[in-house]
Amino acid sequence: MPPRELKVKDLVVKYDSKKFKFKTTAEVAPLEGMIGQTRAERATDFGLRIKRPGYNIFMTGLTGTGKSSYAQSIIDKISAEEPVPDDWCYVYNFDSPGEPIALDIPAGKGYDFCRDIEELLEDLKQSIPKAFEGEDYERQKSAYVKKYQEARSAILEELNKAAGEEGFALRRTSSGFVTVPLRDGEQIDEEEYAKLEQTEKDELEKRSSSVQLKIMEFMSRVQKAEKDLKEELNNLEQRIGLASIGHLFEDLIAEYKEYPKIKKYLEDYKKDVLSNLSDFREEEEDQQAPLMWLRRQGGDQAGMRYKVNLLVDNRDTKGAPVVYETNPSYYNLLGRVEYENRMGTVVTDFTMIKPGAFHHANGGYLILQARDILTGMQSWEVLKRVLRTREIRIENIGEHFGLIAMSTLRPQSIPLNIKVVIIGNPFLYHLLYHYDEDFRKLFKIKADFDVEMSRNQDHITKMAGFIAYHCNKQGLRHFDGEAVARIVEHSTRLTENRAKLSTRFNEIVDLLFEADTWAGLDGLEIVEAAHVEKALEEMVYRSGKYEQKLQEAIKDEQILIDLKGEKIGQVNALSVIDQGDYRFGRPSRITASTYLGRRGIINIERESELSGKLHNKGVLILSGYLGQRYGTLVPLNLTASICFEQSYGGVDGDSASAAELFCLLSSLAEIPVRQDLAITGSVNQRGEIQPIGAVNSKIEGFFMVCKKVGLTGDQGVIIPDKNKRSLMLKKEVVEAVERGEFHIYCIKTVDEGMELLTGLKAGRLRQDKTFTRTSYDQKVLEKLKEYNEAAEKSNKRSNNNKK
């Protein structure tokens, strides 16, 4: 089948704006939701509905396909139908102060509970001092003290009497009682005592020891009386305190009777208050006393234990919470225990426990970016841990590495009920799936976002709704039908498939912004097709410096490219340069040299380590083609070198393998090939031309070079027949083709390409194992036979010399 030149209708698929039922997008209902992502939508909806452990979601797809915006919109919609989770707070643990207690309470009641506890503390500060200022307390206290004093006086009087009977008087000193001997009712001083006979002294010592024993006995009775007094006073304070605060606690306990953990906390609270009534009693203190400020600070810290740390407050939450954590560090996820410096010492308490994203999202949804969670120190590990254990346990990250050795709080863990949605690209998904054994257990739902969708009327109508939505949301000017049609065509161009539309909506939104700006600069209130065209042209111009420099270098013959005439063993191949934000096509000269030898095809790029794996594969396929086409007819005693001339940055991909084969066949057959045509396409071992990528950029790149140097009317491009469906060429190229200044041909086989380049058709293999005489195949075969005969003669001479 001869090669076919493409017509204008084959080069671009226009959309007729008359099919729209609106004049501008102001008349279009804004689109809510996604377009063309049925697979991802169904997976996401199922993943959000199933409430089982491990069914978290990983949204995967290329950047710009709308994963993040869709995740937020669908989760907001579903979460609004779900119940609001409980509030969570931490309170003081009176039994184990280092382990604060976590309390849960229905949404909104956590704030009320905090207010109730604050009011309770204020009531205690007022009620307790008043109770101990009353006459009843002072009267009862005085009675107990008086009773003690009387008992003590009686004991001491009895002790003095017993000592007198033994002939001693008692003298009180700082260390206790001292016995003083008596004579005739008078105390003996030290001089008189020294004059006594030794026997008399011994007698006094003996009786003194007996008195000392009685002193110890009587003092024990005094200490017991003191102990009884303390107990009676303590019981009195307990009765007075309970009478003054009992009703306060009973009211709260009755209010929160449905919550056993809160009820127990209030009972423990009451016991602690009764045990520490002195903390609430107002006593006159010397304001100038040393360290008074330190004592007051200590009292304030003691009062901290009666506060409530409301960790999660859901009183204003509607439905289940949705948290999008943009900085998922270890502490931002898990929460932390903060510290402060007091007198050079780092201290903390349960009121310094701060929540993390897990706490805020508990009972709802947490959205994370894969790259963020994987690059945060220990973030990925803590995420897996809480999903495995289904509880939030706040810990210091330094303890995991042994960096910090100091006492700290151990807050009780909080049960976790959460759905995690991670957004990432396919590379990260497969990396985690294959190398992290926990990943497939914890993220069982994969929502795979496509980069394209079918180009049908339904999707085109929704595209108009998408544009209307962003015009309303972003305050953009509305687009008329022609402008929307131009955006639809650009969307198709992005996919390189005339039957598809792009779902990389970020690029579409960028185009909307820029077209709106150009309309504003023109002073118009409606965006027209010309503004969309202008925006696209300016996008290219901003990034097209290198492309322009390259074209100028070709025009100035600094880069050698022939655009007319014919040459043997030389063709123009088309490659693409991708700068990230912009890619463009460029022609490259390929040359081939063939001669007698046994080394086969030498890839100069490979030998110089400038060739990628795919390019190496493409060159190796050439050997397979030559072998199956000619190797059965004649031995291949051939050496051929193929080179990308003036290529300094490396070559990869197999899209130039067809051009390399044409160049090789031209050199072998010594047939000149047209230099006004450039070729792109890969080839297989059977000589079939296979489709390649970036065909529009390659065609446009060669056209721009020809235009820069000068169009002759014969120049054009040869592309694979399978790439016809990819053509969405720029207006300038289409118009040049329409005027006959540029040509685009499609081929299915090597034979068609050689016919177009050389004017010679493929040969038909005859019974004598030769091809049609005028074919290029016969010329190749004759050259190979010539090489073979030369090789045989060389071998014979070599053998004769050996003999």
Image (cartoon, grey):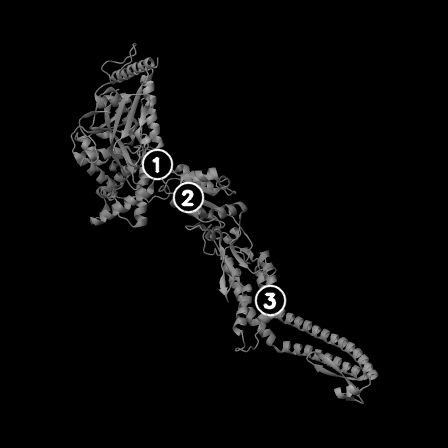
First of labels 3, 1 by sequence position: 3
Can you tell which of label 2 and label 3 is closer to the viewer? 2
Can you tell which of label 2 and label 1 is closer to the viewer? 2
Relative side of 79 to 455, left or right: right
Q: CA distance from mark 3 to mark 1?
A: 68 Å
Residue linked to disc 3: 273
Mark 2 residue crowding within 10 angstroms, few (<14) / some (14–19) / many (20+) = many
Q: How many marks?
A: 3
Where residue 362 is drawn, which disc sits there?
A: none
Q: Residue at x 24, y 39 (%)?
A: 547
Q: Residue at x 17, y 30 (%)?
A: 741
Q: Is residue 469 above or below residue 128?
A: above
Question: How far across and down, in percent of the image, does residue 255 sit?
Answer: 57, 60
Relative side of 795 to 437, left or right: left
Relative side of 182 to 600, left or right: right
Where residue 452 is drawn, which disc sits there?
A: 1
Question: How far across and down, in percent of the image, does residue 288 sit?
Answer: 52, 78
Question: How far across and down, in percent of the image, does residue 34 sit?
Answer: 37, 41
Mark 3 residue crowding within 10 angstroms, few (<14) / some (14–19) / many (20+) = many
First of labels 2, 1 by sequence position: 2
The quarter of the rendered structure image containing the N terminus is top left
The answer to whether residue 36 shows anywhere in this view is yes
For label 2, the SS is: strand
**Quadrant of the rendered structure where residue 645 is?**
top left
For label 1, the SS is: strand
Q: Is residue 243 above or below residue 634?
A: below
Q: Residue furthest top?
A: 767
For label 3, the SS is: helix
First of labels 2, 3 by sequence position: 3
Where residue 423 is drawn, which disc sits there?
A: 2
**Quadrant of the rendered structure where residue 267 is?**
bottom right
